[in-house]
Image (tube, helix red, strand yellow):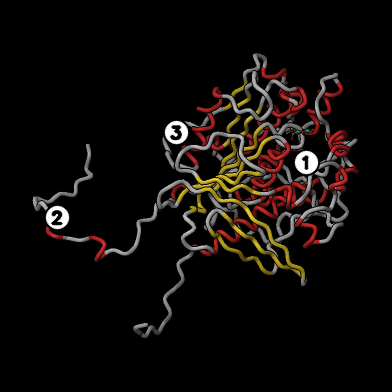
Amino acid sequence: ENTNVVKTDSPNNSGYEEPRWVDWTTPRLNEAEQPPQPPNTGACGALPDPLPLRSIPQLPDPFTFLNTNPVRTRDDWFCRRQEISSLFQVLELGVIPPKPEYVGGSLIGTNLTVEARQNGRSVSFSARVDLPSGTGPFPAIIAIGGSSIPIPAGVAVITFPNDDIAEQVDTTSRGKGIFYNLYGTSHSASALAAWTWGVSRVIDVLQTIEGSRIDLGRLAVTGCSRNGKGALVVGAFEQRISLTIPQESGTGGAGCWRIADSLSTLGVQTQTARSIVTENVWFSTLFNNYASRVNDLPIDHHLLAAMIAPRALFVIENTQMDWLGPRSVYGCIRTAAKVFQALNFTDRIGFSQVGGHAHCQFPESQRADLNAYLNKFLLRDLTTNTAIFRTDSADQNGYVENTWVNWGIPRLSNASVPPPAGNACPPLPANITPKKT
Ligand code: MCU
């Protein structure tokens, strides 16, 4: 029954003129829909020095800390996530620096300017903001180097100039771009790490702009192929992003190094860690040490994807191209889904893998899957079914789970997940003197 009744028999609403009495707008309150926030982790997740490495032929267990302690609660998971984050930075991506001393900027028309200063150096860059018409606030998709997915009405697009932040022409791009002008050409950050830093600064600036018409509680990130690898890393590390949509990111993105290596051994023309480090600067020079022995890594990309939990992840892939490693991305994301399952958020990880189209040409047949994620996590239609995990490969790309997963899924207890510190109601001060300002 419809109980949404506000009526009067006065033809002019009793002469009530709302703008005279109400000069504020109604926010869309969404607290109940927010995923639990990571607790303040402090020193938790700190890495031992030296870092012990051992050969792990299967995909490493998300639910066991390096020191072999088990992950038993949701809080434990956030601590393990911290450990995983550090491992990725130390072994693969290079360090993603924290917010610099100064970040500022402006939004004029479609031009968002970001300025960052650190240790007496200053850099700036621009991102393009395309808003729908209307007053908003609108959800927004941050497109790494541009978007190759259909954007629904009512969603803003922020085009992030990743090639300006860190170049990706070939291996001669190492240390080139705005990020390295600030932090130095020999900084360990790879291109993917530098882009992540840059996207975080875009969000920092948007947070300072009142009336930007962008709802910072509803941000997504996307990118295709090499930029899809970037989108996945951005979503993994930047927790202000609610929905991560890597498209055809393949090896080095949604694919797992170990499964890609095994495909290559079987003669499938798949990109591997060994080859990726000779092609471009997406990974840190630190990773060169491991590219030919990925089994020695305590991480693989199922853990990168799992860092997004319990925020939402929707992976778009293509069975058409061996280079992307269809079996690898399928198995890798299916394994990442086990973390979402343990946290009891199975509707926040989706996978759609469809061939029959060229690389980064989004096919109509994936639109419903994509829209389900956009509807639920950006447009807030909470009734949408996002339990989507599909491939058009008749044999699931030949993926055999027990080759890769030799651990079980714990039921993580709901142990306290405290709200972020800033949300606590401050106590009233003892003496309050009302004063007109
Ligand atoms: C799938 O993304 C990459 C791939 O990893 C590279 O090996 C190839 O050179 O470029 C692809 C891409 O970015 O295509 C646009």
Where is residue 208 shown, x and y percent of the image?
55, 64
Q: Is 405 situated left or right of 1 in this image?
A: right
Where is residue 131 shown, x and y percent of the image?
49, 48
- Nearest to the eye among marks 1 and 2: give it: 2
Q: Is 339 situated left or right of 96 in this image?
A: left
Q: CA distance from mark 1 to mark 2?
A: 64 Å
Q: Is residue 67 visible?
A: no
Q: Earlier in the sequence, mark 3 or mark 1?
A: 1
**Disc assigned to residue 384:** 3
Q: Which residue is mark 2?
A: 13
Which element type, helix, strand or loop, lies under badge 3? loop
- Going 62% across and 53% down the picture, which residue do you hit? 127
**Disc assigned to residue 299:** 1
Name the residue at the top extreme. 394
Q: Residues within 10 Å of mark 3 (few under 14, many from 20)?
A: some
- Going 23% across and 60% down the picture, which residue do you hit? 18
Residue 200's image quarter?
bottom right
Where is residue 350 shown, x and y percent of the image?
58, 32
**Disc assigned to residue 425:** none
